Image (tube, rainbow, N blue to C red):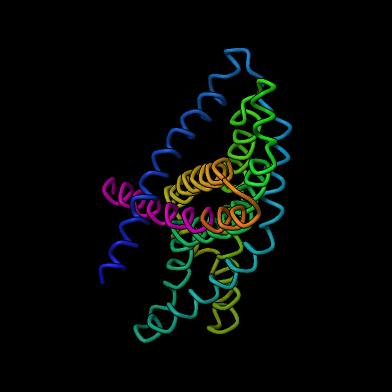
C-alpha cells in the first residue's frame, strides 16, 4: 500500500512540476508570437503553415473514421431509450449537441495527441539528444522561436478545423443510422438537427479545441526539449507526452465545460 501511495505521490508531483514548466513555456511562446514582431523578431509563418498541414493531414482520416462511428453509436444508444418513450425525433438533437459540444473536440484532441503530439516530442527529443538544439542556442537562435512557436501555432489552426470537420462527420454518421434503422427521412433529420443546434454549441467546441491544441503543443514541446540520455529516453519522452497531454486535455475539458455550465 505504501508503495502505491509513493508512486502516486511521485507521479502527481511530477505532473504539477511539469504543469508549471509548461505554463512558463506557453508564456514565452505567446510573447514571441504576439510581441515578437514589434521587437524585430521574425515569425516563421511558413514553418507554421507546414506544421498546420502536417497536423491536419496526418489526423484527417482517423478523425473522420472515429467520429462517424461515434455518431452512429450515439444514434443507436439514444434511439434505444427514446423509442420506448415515443421520442425518436429527439435523436438528432442529442447526437448533434453531444458531438459539437463534447465528443468532437475531445476525440479529435486525443487523436491529435497520439499522432502529432507524440511526433513533436520525438522530433525535439531527438534534436536535444543529438545536441542540435544546443547548436541553435550557440548560434543565438531561440529554440522557442524556431521550434516551439511554429508547432503550437500550427496546432492552434489545425485542431479547430479538424473539430469542425469532426462535427460534420459525426452528425452525418448519426444521420446514416437514424435514416436507415429508424426510417426517419434525411431532410427531417437535417431539419431537427438545425433546430436543435445554436451558435453556442459550435463555439463551445471550438473554445475547447483551442485550449486542447495549446496543451498538446506545449506538452509535446516541453517533453522534447527536456529529453536527456539516448534513444531509450526519447521513447519514454514520447510516451510521457501522449499520456500527460490526454490527462491535461481531460482536465481542461472539465474546466471549460464547468465555465459554460455556470454561464448558462
Quarter of the picture holding the N terminus: bottom left
Q: Residue at x 34, y 50 (%)?
A: 13
Q: Nearer the viewer, residue 97 or 8?
A: 8
Locate residue 88: give its quadrant.
Answer: bottom left
Q: State the image coordinates of residue 33 (x, y, percent, origin top left).
A: 57, 26
The image quarter containing residue 225 is top right
Q: Residue at x 38, y 82 (%)?
A: 81
The image quarter in which residue 94 lies: bottom left
Residue situated furthest front in the rendering: 229
Depth check, front residue: 242 or 47:
242
Residue lying at 39% horizontally and 50% vertically, measured from the top left? 15
In the current view of this chain or complex, which residue is farthest to the top?
39
Q: x, y (%) of residue 169?
A: 61, 63
Q: Position of residue 79 (x, y in %)?
A: 44, 80
Q: Is residue 54 left or right of residue 165?
A: right
Check the image and name the residue furthest to the bottom.
84
Looking at the image, residue 253 lies above or below residue 31: below
The boundaries of the magenta stretch are 241-264
Q: Is residue 36 magenta?
A: no
Q: Is residue 98 left or right of residue 32?
A: left
Main secondary-structure element of the magenta-colored stretch = helix
- Report x, y in % for residue 85: 34, 83
In the image: residue 130, left or right of residue 85? right
Magenta segment includes 245: yes
Q: Residue at x 65, y 64 (%)?
A: 62
Q: Is residue 35 above or below residue 159?
A: above
Q: Is residue 119 above or below residue 5?
A: above
Amino acid at each position: 500500500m505504501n508503495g502505491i501511495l509513493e508512486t502516486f505521490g511521485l507521479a502527481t508531483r511530477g505532473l504539477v512540476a511539469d504543469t508549471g514548466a509548461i505554463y512558463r513555456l506557453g508564456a514565452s511562446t505567446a510573447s514571441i508570437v504576439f510581441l515578437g514582431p514589434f521587437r524585430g523578431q521574425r515569425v516563421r509563418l511558413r514553418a507554421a503553415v507546414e506544421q498546420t498541414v502536417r497536423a491536419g493531414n496526418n489526423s484527417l482520416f482517423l478523425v473522420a473514421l472515429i467520429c462517424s462511428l461515434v455518431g452512429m453509436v450515439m444514434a443507436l444508444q439514444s434511439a434505444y431509450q427514446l423509442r420506448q418513450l415515443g421520442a425518436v425525433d429527439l435523436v438528432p438533437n442529442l447526437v448533434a449537441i453531444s458531438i459539437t459540444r463534447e465528443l468532437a473536440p475531445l476525440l479529435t484532441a486525443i487523436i491529435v495527441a497520439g499522432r502529432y503530439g507524440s511526433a513533436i516530442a520525438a522530433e525535439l527529443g531527438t534534436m536535444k539528444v543529438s545536441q542540435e538544439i544546443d547548436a541553435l542556442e550557440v548560434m543565438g537562435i531561440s529554440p522557442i522561436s524556431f521550434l516551439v512557436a511554429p508547432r503550437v501555432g500550427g496546432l492552434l489552426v489545425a485542431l479547430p478545423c479538424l473539430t469542425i470537420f469532426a462535427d460534420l462527420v459525426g452528425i452525418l454518421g448519426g444521420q446514416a443510422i437514424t435514416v436507415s434503422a429508424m426510417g426517419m427521412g434525411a431532410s427531417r433529420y437535417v431539419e431537427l438537427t438545425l433546430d436543435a443546434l445554436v451558435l453556442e454549441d459550435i463555439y463551445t467546441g471550438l473554445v475547447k479545441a483551442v485550449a486542447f491544441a495549446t496543451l498538446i503543443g506545449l506538452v509535446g514541446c516541453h517533453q522534447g526539449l527536456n529529453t536527456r540520455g539516448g534513444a531509450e529516453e526519447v521513447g519514454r519522452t514520447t510516451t510521457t507526452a501522449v499520456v500527460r497531454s490526454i490527462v491535461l486535455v481531460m482536465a481542461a475539458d472539465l474546466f471549460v465545460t464547468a465555465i459554460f455550465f455556470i454561464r448558462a
